[in-house]
Image (cartoon, grey):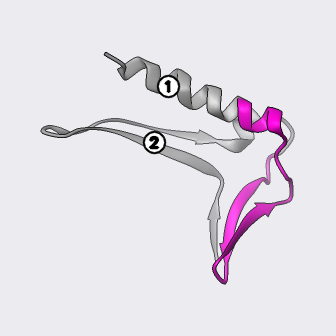
Amino acid sequence: MYRYPAIRITVLNRSEGKIDEIIIRFSDHWAGKDTIHAWTYRGESEWYNYHPTTADYTKIAKAITDYLENFAD
């Protein structure tokens, strides 16, 4: 069983390697959901203890976009 409480993003430069990395935890963006995580068991992935709403996915997408905009040319 694998648990995924966060999304890890690594920014790479093709010739120089890793530039930066961040871990975006679901619990930091979905208040009151401290035990939330995605998990994979026997080849099936699903959410544990909570099923994110469209608004929740929007919050995580915004956090990812805000971070990645720092590296846009």
Q: Residue at x 81, y 37 (%)?
A: 54
Relative vertical location of residue 4 with respect to residue 12 in this rendering, above or below: below
Residue 36 colored magenta? yes
**Callout 1: few (<14), some (14-19), or many (20+) C-alpha neighbours within 10 Å?**
some
Label 1: element kind: helix
Point out the image quarter for the C terminus: top left
If you read the primary sequence from the N terminus, does the residue marked by circle 2 or circle 1 appear first? Answer: 2
Whole-angstrom CA distance, mark 2 to mark 1, is 9 Å
Instruction: Report the residue marked by disc 1.
Output: 67
Tell me, for residue 44, which label it has, or none.
Answer: none
Q: Which residues are magenta?
A: 34-58
Relative vertical location of residue 54 with respect to residue 36 in this rendering, above or below: above
Task: Residue 30: give x, y in percent of width and height.
Answer: 79, 37
User: Given contact means CB atoms under 8 Å apart, are the residues at marks 2 and 1 in contact?
Assistant: yes
Q: Quadrant of residue 69?
A: top left
**Along the horizontal axis of the image, is 19 left or right of 22?**
left
Q: Residue at x 80, y 62 (%)?
A: 48
Q: Nearer the viewer, residue 49 or 57?
A: 57
Residue 41 colored magenta? yes
Tell me, for residue 9, which label it has, or none.
Answer: 2
Q: Nearer the viewer, residue 54 or 48?
A: 54
Q: Nearer the viewer, residue 23 or 38?
A: 38
